[in-house]
Image (cartoon, coloured by chain):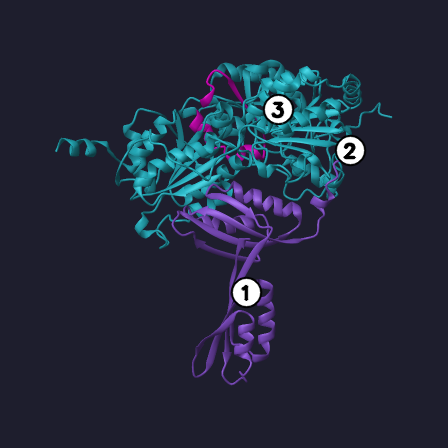
Chain colours: A purple, B cyan
Amino acid sequence: MNNFNHFYDSEERREVLSIIVVNKDSVLSRIVDLFSARGYNIDSLTVAPIPNSEYSRITIITIGIARTIDQIVKQLNKLIPVLKVIEHRDVIEKDTVLIKIPLDQSLSDVDVLARAYNGAIQNVTDEAIVISATDDPKRILNFIKVIEKYKPIEIVRSGVVAMER
Amino acid sequence: MKNETETIEKQLTGSQIVIEALHRENTEVVFGYPGGAIMNVYDEIYKQNYFQHILVKHEQAAVHAADAYARSSGKVGVAIVTSGPGFTNAVTGLATAYTDSIPMVVISGQVPTAVIGTDAFQEIDAVGISRSCTKHNFLVNDVKDLTRVLKIAFHIARTGRPGPVHIDLPKDVSIELANFNYEQEFDLPTYKPTTKGNVRQIKAALQKISQSKRPVLYVGGGAVLSNCYEDIRAFAHQTKIPVVETLMARGIMKSDDELLFGMLGMHGEYAANMAMSETDMIICLGARFDDRVTGRLDVFAKKAQVVHVDIDPASIAKIIKPNYPIVGDLAIVMKQILEHTKDFEFNDYSSWNKTLLKYRKQHPLAYLEDSDRLKPQWVIQRTGELLGDKALISTDVGQHQMWAAQFYPFNYPRQWMTSGGLGTMGVGLPYAMGMKRANPDKIAVNFTGDGSIMMNIQEIITCTQYNLPHINIILNNNYLGMVRQWQTRFYEDRLAETTLDIQADFTMLSQSMGGVGYKVHTKEEFDAALKDAVESNKVAMIEVIIERREEVLPMVPNGHALDEMLLLETKGDK
């Protein structure tokens, strides 16, 4: 009678969480500790203060079955400095990537490619150029794949920020 | 000029703020141990007359004693320790209280803020360590923040799902000056525990309960913490729904209540585990479906609907997803339940109760008198007969703990102090200390084993010094008995490091620290020793030589379903 198979045995899903916290009492390490102590995944984590307030927003991308996601949200809410946890449903996600490419590569298409992913060339030196792009995380992954043929020296991703539509 | 003087007069040092705050929180006793980083606070403890300080012999015992003080009184327990090793010794105490949701405030000294992070003498990242075993913790960097931290710490400790709060106080902060005003309100917008249950959900649950055929009330430690046993008894008796208790909930029902079918779980009573296996409606009141309660989870309560009342939303659907989740303070929710109980016509559960009574008769909690030596269960039962409600009971962890939970006649909540969640050996003696301090009119009894008792044995002398008499009943089988039982059952009797052949002379040990001691082999000797121990009004050690190979039964082996119990084999069994 107590049949909640969709809860116990669901497919793993990707969840975007916004956690609004008070900037006090080492709140970030509390959140990271919670994930490691209870064995939850963190796929991406970003944090920045919310303008004109005492709060910060932490955006976490995690992966888990329904029951795990349910626990993550509840355990986060239980932390004293956490004001609220938002489980995003219809969300705009943005990820930024910085990529350094050596100048000895053929660079004719780089500018065009970057533009296709809402990006641009940011800096050019004698040895390398740095391009950036900001886009949906899936497209950023795609962009990184495409750019691999230019043998990038370094790739830096920002992690995901998200906002409900 | 005059105004300026007034302002100056109101200023207190950080240490004075601690003392004044403890006083305003009605603290009457602090358990602790001084040291370099906390000396300023101890200097103020010396000067004050608000509360007693009990100097333990080891910081772990200070926190356990404060924990038992809280368990047995319902108030917030307080302990103070120094930095570094003082704090790390306290960690087991914090973790024990955290796992059982016990309200406590533990204050530790810390090296001065200027040297934090330099690996200074007796420096350790205390808040980093305590983060995962406290409800919340604070490192106070500014004396101006200290009053807020103290007031919020007590508030957090005692509200919502209670728990220990740790405050780390650097030495310089404890001598700096700040204004003190404890009446000030401090806003805490991120912490607002839900206390009232959702009425529509409660009614829907009652409707479903009333139509169920085999409901059972599964009552946990939350019922003790929220002080609502009278309402639970009333609800059970109005509806005639049978009750099972967790280890933490012993005493919620009177031991002889006809609706109580005992403790459930790994060492639960046969009837209680059968009730949970056959029920079609589990009403969980302040329990959390611990693995020691559910047994094999994928077959647990498959036939049952579940109503789960808990103040901690994270406890709900953590293990078992309920059909009717109700978040709220059990004390308030029980009032709401009782208010609406009369609106529903409950089924007649007399045949269900009869079934459970039949199970109880088939396999009652029992033991055999088949040894020359005393049986531990007899010792506990006999203590119950002789002391009954006059005694508060603490235990350590192991076989003796389970026998005590099974065989002592608990009749009211907070009569029973045990480390349920963490299973900390060594709590028994400091628990006896803390519960005696909170309840001077009761007889404090610690059931312990020959393994556990040695883990905080040094505190006998503390109890002598502060006149906190209690009786340690050591059920001595020269084994770490619970591990030995598993080794026998599941490791082909290879007794790896569980035999305790060389032991202290417990009588002399007790006497050397101002107590009395008895070594007991027979029933007559036990009766005489217990009587003498009570009358001595000293710390007593009654060492009872028990049957070495006695087992805790029933037993649900790890990974088995709740109804797959190993049971006592009697000679007449078919």
Name the residue tied to disc 1. A135
Tell me, for residue B250, which label it has, or none: 3
Q: Chain of mark 2?
A: B
> Reading the chain from its start, which is encountered first: label 2 or label 3?
3
Badge 2 local density, few (<14 within 10 Å), some, or many (20+)?
A: some
Q: What SS does tag 3 mark?
A: loop
Q: Chain of mark 1?
A: A
CB within 8 Å, label 2 to label 3: no
Q: Residue at x 58, y 71 (%)?
A: A143
* Callout 3 amino acid: Arg
* Callout 2 amino acid: Lys
Residue A97 screen position, x and y as percent: 51, 68
Looking at the rendered image, the disc whose residue lies closer to the viewer, 1 or 3, is 1
Q: Is residue B443 magenta?
A: yes
Q: CA distance from mark 1 to mark 2?
A: 50 Å
Magenta-highlighted residues: B437-463
